[in-house]
Image: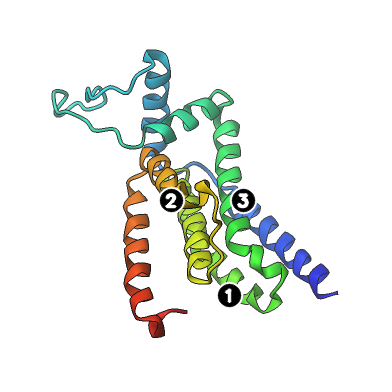
Amino acid sequence: MDKKLGLLALIILLLTTAVLSSHSLIDLDIWLHCSSGHDILSNLSVTDANSYSFTNPEYRWHNHEWLFQIFVSLFHVGGIPGLNLLRLALCLAIAFLLFKPVINRLSLFLPATISLLLLWPRFLLRPELVSSIFLLIAIKWILAEINGETPNSKWGKYRTIVLSLIWAQFHGFFIILPMLWLLVALLKRNPRYLL
């Protein structure tokens, strides 16, 4: 019975996420991301030319969000509905990763609901949405490491490196991952501070 109730709570949280993520595209950066992604796909390369600046067009641009821009550009083929679909998919992925534990622990429903309401203003189609997904995956892996549940396969040893390399192409927050692992390594030396 509790598992069914937990599943119902997860469905309610996911539906609430879908409703909260269904607002207009108010972030003006999205159009820069669409244009940059279109240019990357057209030229099949990431340029360092600052072609979108009127004040300093000769300034060299380091486009560190190029992979996000490709995704946005691909979904922009569907127009505004396509971009809204991408935002909905990213928000639902975040909600699922964040709220999945509610299935087994119904006591997490209230904190999950509060978390959802706090996240709602950040449901903008920006690279941070992808960073949130990567961060939640990283936290899951770190908690597994702390609890001694790390897989012994080769993938288990290198997955953090692969995640960092992919994450770095989407958004600059990838730097959080090595810092989290460093924190875990320091805390493992003094286990009384671990969860």
Q: Secondary structure at mark 1?
A: helix
**Of label 3 and label 1, which has the lower sequence position?**
3
Which residue is drawn at the image coordinates 43% and 36% (left, top)?
68
Q: Quadrant of residue 45?
A: top left
Which residue is drawn at the image coordinates 47% and 63% (left, top)?
142
Instruction: Please name the amino acid that badge 3 sits on.
Output: Leu
Decide: is 24 above or below 116.
above
**Gap between marks 1 and 2, in whole Å?**
28 Å
Looking at the image, residue 87 sits to the left or right of residue 10; the answer is: left
Instruction: Please name the amino acid that badge 1 sits on.
Output: Pro
User: Which residue, given by chain and number where applicable, does mark 1 sit on?
Assistant: 111
Decide: is 176 above or below 130.
below
Which residue is drawn at the image coordinates 59% and 50% (left, top)?
93
User: Which is in the foreground here, disc 2 or disc 3?
Assistant: 2
Looking at the image, residue 9 sits to the left or right of residue 154; the answer is: right
Which residue is drawn at the image coordinates 70% and 56% (left, top)?
15
**Which of the pair 154/32 is nearer the observer?**
154
Quarter the N terminus occupies: bottom right
User: Which residue, given by chain and number where applicable, does mark 2 sit on?
Assistant: 160
Instruction: Please name the amino acid that badge 2 sits on.
Output: Thr
